[in-house]
Image (cartoon, coloured by chain):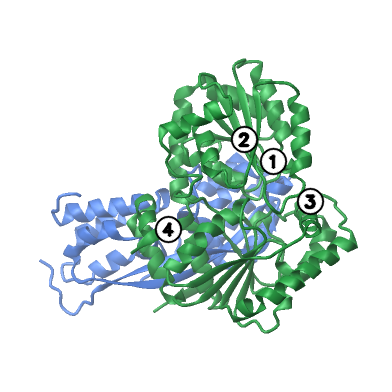
Chain colours: A blue, B green
Amino acid sequence: MAKKSKIGSFAVKDCALAAISTGKRAQNLKELREQLLTIHPGAVYYHFWGGLLRPRFDDPEYNNDFASWAHHGLHDITLAERLGIIDPADFEDLEALRQEIIDVLEERMDETEYLPWAKRDRQFHFIRAQTVVFDTNRRIQKPEELPEIMPQLSVGSIYYHFIDARRRPPFGMDDFRAWLEKFDNGYKHLCADIAGIDPYFTGLMELRQQLSLLFNHHFGRAQA
Amino acid sequence: MKGFLKAYTDVAGKDVINHLVQLAASLKGKKVVHVNSTRAGGGVAEILTILVPLMKELGMDARWEVIAGSADFYQCTKHFHNALQGDPVNIPETLLKVYEDINARNAEELREVLEDADIVFIHDPQPAPLLNLCPGRKGKWIWRCHIDVSHPYRQAWKYLRHFVADYDASVFSLSAFAQPLPHLIYLIPPSIDPLSEKNMELDQDEINSVYDRFSLDRERPMMLQVSRFDRFKDPLGVIQAYQLAKNFIPTLQLVLAGGGAGDDPEGEDVLNEVRLAAKDDSDIHILPLPPDAHRTINALQRTASFVLQKSIKEGFGLTVSEAMWKSKPVIGGDTGGIRLQLVNHHTGFLVNSPEGAALRIRYLHTNREKREEMGHKAREFVRENFLITRQLREYLTLMVGLTHGSEERIELG
């Protein structure tokens, strides 16, 4: 089995997001594109991932705010579908993601004869997040503890370790895999299973449940 | 864990409460003061009633101060309320003078407490001038605007802006409600308190008591709107929707229940208009309730077949979340914060006219199973997103964030 060499314990952190208005908004496709060229990268992040930590329905129609606005603000269903399929996890950083959105918008602008406009009270408002990260003082000493601890984590912790982690080195990877891979056997199967969880199409509570099931299964524990 | 925090654990979950405790750790001992203009009536007072004790339990030295006004002062601030929501109201100079004088008088009373505070939340326009009247302030001052100022009457906003521009930050319920200001603008939707008298579980006898008390027929469907008698809540539109729906549901009853607020002098006029529109229809029940009739409102919401919040302009409209918490799908005006609370076709319906409201009433009346399914989804949606614990978390995040400037990421500890 795994050898615990000099690998440190897993420090469980938690986080909370405060939404901040950027004051920027768009009423049509052209304005959306122009704002996107220069908007704070935190706004691109917020409109893709921030939805997980703010009021939203458990089964949203679209998983990013740009797609949702294209549908409900501009009534351009084709554009909404194209934006809706963008998976932020496919991009190495926020700049690449930003460029992809702009490409989709420009393609749509090339196709359309006239620019669709949103009503005055349906404008797109760019929002960014301020993230406060704090230590829960909880430490996971060995991977076998994961099944017990996972159900007790707050959704803020799930967000921090599973979503937000992808923005921190090693980029694109959640904290659980980053920790497990340091062990000699690397928990290859477990890490592959964790990588198979798609965080983009689920809520944080469901993510917590999926991770719990996975750890329970892997470490042979009966489910609570 | 003790008191309120323990009680909320059962409703919101242990992980949610632990999260709050840890987030608040760095704020322990901070002097936090909330200031508004009424201790009873309206959503702001209701939220502060519980928010302040919760902050205390989390270790902050929190207090709630209420400024004292006069009839002219409230007349002026009511004009503000309407003008900031777009009504072209020219507020007479004499009333503006009263507004400034009353604030100056309150500053004399509150200056010591406010200048000594680490964090001050000033709620809405009524006490906004207090900032400039406290030159020795040492803490962070936040203007919390609960109303929709997305399209204000410019003259009124221009006047108010010079009082709020110097704050360290402001908070709006939605991005769409905000105006550009030269400081950080946080976005925090309000919430409901699941343990308050307005939202707590009631026994069936108490729920049933409203039938006899208000001469309602328990065997017949009842539609309900709970709100102040305020033109933006469109009570006349609700009566029209009722009349349209009644053509198809002859047994329908309508209840318009409204609490007044100490700072709303216009309510009586609107109430008279509503009485006039109701004519002599004995199935329309107009219930002007006192501001503390929380249990009565709770029982009415639980007995209602359909709940409406047909506002044409709405800051947030907490009655939407209150009814949803009681597993009622809500028919709400397609405006402001109602759009955030209500997921169209899932937890209720967004409507743009009395005709739209009448159509949805008929739909829900005909499809009882759908009504129950939507009601269940509505309650769970509120549990996840609109309980006081979520709002408290965002206030704590703001307070921590503000002490660190505009940094995108703050690592504590």
Q: Earlier in the sequence, mark 1 or mark 3?
A: 3
- Would residue B61 be found to the left or right of residue B283 on screen? left
State the CA–CA distance, disc 2 to disc 4.
45 Å
- Label 4 with label 3: CB-CB less than 8 Å: no
Within 10 Å of the Cα at label 3, are there few (<14), some (14-19), or many (20+) other Cα atoms?
Answer: some
**Residue sitting farthest toward the left:** A1
Q: Which residue is mark 1?
A: B233
**What percent of the width, then of the height, locates residue B261?**
67, 50
* Nearest-to-viewer mark from 1 and 3: 1
* Nearest-to-viewer mark from 3 and 2: 2
Q: Which residue is mark 3?
A: B86
Co-location on one chain, circles 4 and 3: no
User: Which of the two residues, B164 or B123, is positioned nearer the viewer here?
Assistant: B123
State the CA–CA distance, disc 1 to disc 3.
14 Å
The residue type indicated by label 4 comes to Ala
The residue type indicated by label 1 comes to Lys
* Quarter residue B234 falls in: top right
Where disc 2 sits, the SS reads strand
Within 10 Å of the Cα at label 2, are there few (<14), some (14-19), or many (20+) other Cα atoms?
Answer: many
Residue B225 image label: 2
**What percent of the width, then of the height, locates residue A51?**
49, 54
Q: Tell me which residue sits at (45%, 61%) in the image.
A: A91
Where disc 1 sits, the SS reads helix
The residue type indicated by label 3 comes to Gly
**What percent of the width, then of the height, locates residue B329?**
52, 34
The reply to whether residue A157 is in sight is no
The reply to whether residue A10 is in sight is yes
The residue type indicated by label 2 comes to Gln
